[in-house]
Amino acid sequence: MDKIVSQFLAQVNARNQNEPEFMQAVTEVAETVIPYIVQQDIYYGQNILLRMVEPERVVSFRVAWIDDNEEIQVNRGYRIEMNSAIGPYKGGLRFHPSVNLSVLKFLAFEQIFKNSLTTLPMGGGKGGSDFNPKGRSDTEVMRFCQSFMTELFRHIGPNRDIPAGDIGVGSREIGYLFGQYKRLKNEFTGVLTGKGVSWGGSLIRPEATGYGVVYFTQQMLDHQNDNLEGKKIVISGSGNVAQFAAEKCIQLGGKVMTLSDSSGYIFDPDGIDEEKLAFIMDLKNVKRGRIHEYAEHYPSASFHSGKKPWEVPCEIALPCATQNELSGKDAELLIKNGCRCVGEGANMPSTPEAITLFVKNKVLFAPGKASNAGGVAVSGLEMAQNSLRYSWTREEVDQRLQTIMKDIHQSCIQFGTEKEQVNYVKGANIAGFVKIADAMLAQGVV
Ligand code: NDP
Ligand code: 2IT
């Protein structure tokens, strides 16, 4: 078995050199899915995984724009259209200086499995740019978004490819992107998700990823006859996902001890309550400030510059910032300090070494493609509402989100149970794979 997996990975690596993040994501899937494929006559010999690692289409383009000093800036834009077997390409846009082909291909690859797990008809895609919105004025961000969309618009559409937000792309950016698309196409369609509620957005979409992570974590705990009540929770990041993960943890009686950004983390031994979280939301979403300002405002809290929150003792850890933010060493420390449950809000935040340690030490570990699927799931619900030209209430969307997260948890149990233990990595990968593989087989060799 190891030989089949390593031969497969060598073949993929030969074609995708210098793409470490993409190979990391493919390796995790190959190690769990290939042993399953070889036992299934319908899949074996069809090279389905080899087809899935090859994007259906990759678009890369120049984004030139003029900054506030009237200097011409040049960035690179991308859209990876990874797989459309079960629906139109769907996935976010990331604006961050670290964006490159490897990062976006790993995200697009993960997205195929995640979208399949949601039970909704969405294929996988991802895009973005190495543009850094940090420190840029609103008008600079608008000019960049307009230039980016002036090329992207010809590749996307409500039945073709539907982008959304990710790191560095929130409601402000989605607004500017949507405005430019509408201007170019002279059409008002649901081509992007994460729109404002008054112009086609869905209630609960901003909350969905963070809430979904906590609903999934709740499911894992419930399966062990446990719950979130009174648990010490460590969260990384302080953006969209982290904020609403924190909000839901607080609502369910958990004690949120930390949040972070790329400069460091804040630790509040009294716990972050709803009022303190409102301060953070205003600081981050309106003032676009830095997390250390929290510690300056609340004397009970401390700021730990250049550090990650994994050194704070906790029972539950929710990494909600970025890929590979939780190393093997961090995992060792978390386990030593009593952490029993990890729910990934970010995409691929735990390194392979960290995952191995979690699984070996029987820590409940939810991979992002299962636990952070709530965001894209509510994007799917936004698409459904756009098609109906109707909108559902908050309660209705939240109820559907909860049902979807419960169903994903059930799929992980169905495909990931081994010796009465649930391996959520294996469960998510196989459950996601099966639906796409069946569709690809039915649609012939394409
Ligand atoms: P935001 O841009 O809103 O927030 C990102 C947060 O992560 C910020 O606090 C940011 O700090 C921090 N961060 C980003 N890059 C780094 C880095 N290289 N090192 C340390 N910290 C970093 O993004 P989201 O909250 O939307 O996304 C967070 C994660 O969740 C990503 O992995 C994303 O792919 C994933 N995700 C997002 C979904 C969504 O619906 N938005 C859905 C599913 C997954 P700073 O401001 O200092 O950069
Ligand atoms: O990683 C993700 O799932 C997202 N950034 C959300 C994608 C979406 O289309 O809502």
Image (tube, grey):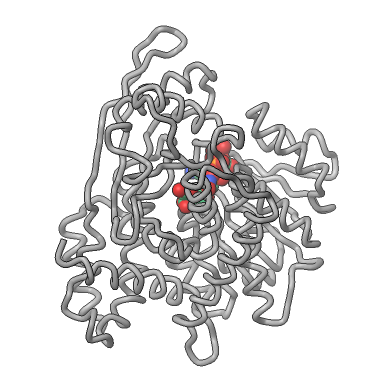
Give the x, y percent position of residue 248: 72, 55
45 left or right of 415 in image: left
Which one is nearer the viewer's eye here, 131 or 161? 161
| Near-viewer residue (443 or 281) | 443
Q: What residue is shown at x 54% (from left), y 23% (from top)?
A: 135
Quarter containing the C terminus: bottom left
Image quarter (top left, top right, bottom left or bottom right) of the N terminus: bottom left
Q: Residue furthest bottom?
A: 419
Q: Is residue 262 above or below residue 268?
A: above
Q: Residue drawn at (42%, 40%), measured in percent from left and top? A: 93
Res. 322 in view: no
Residue in the foreground of this view, choosing between 264 and 218 = 218
* Location of residue 224 (image quadrant): bottom right
Question: x, y percentage for residue 339?
Answer: 66, 70
Rendered location of residue 20, percent (x, y)? 31, 54
Image spot of residue 415 (x, y percent): 44, 81
Direction from residue 396 to residue 296 in the image, left or right: right
Give the residue at x 32% y 82%: 36
Residue at position x 49%, y 28% from top? 133
What residue occupies the far top of the structure in this picture? 70
> Does 145 appear above or below 313?
above
- Tell me, yes or no, if residue 182 can be seen here: yes
- Judged left or right of residue 216, residue 438 is left
Res 187 quadrant in image: top left
Identify the image quadrant of residue 197. top right
How many numbered dots are placed on residues in this image? 0
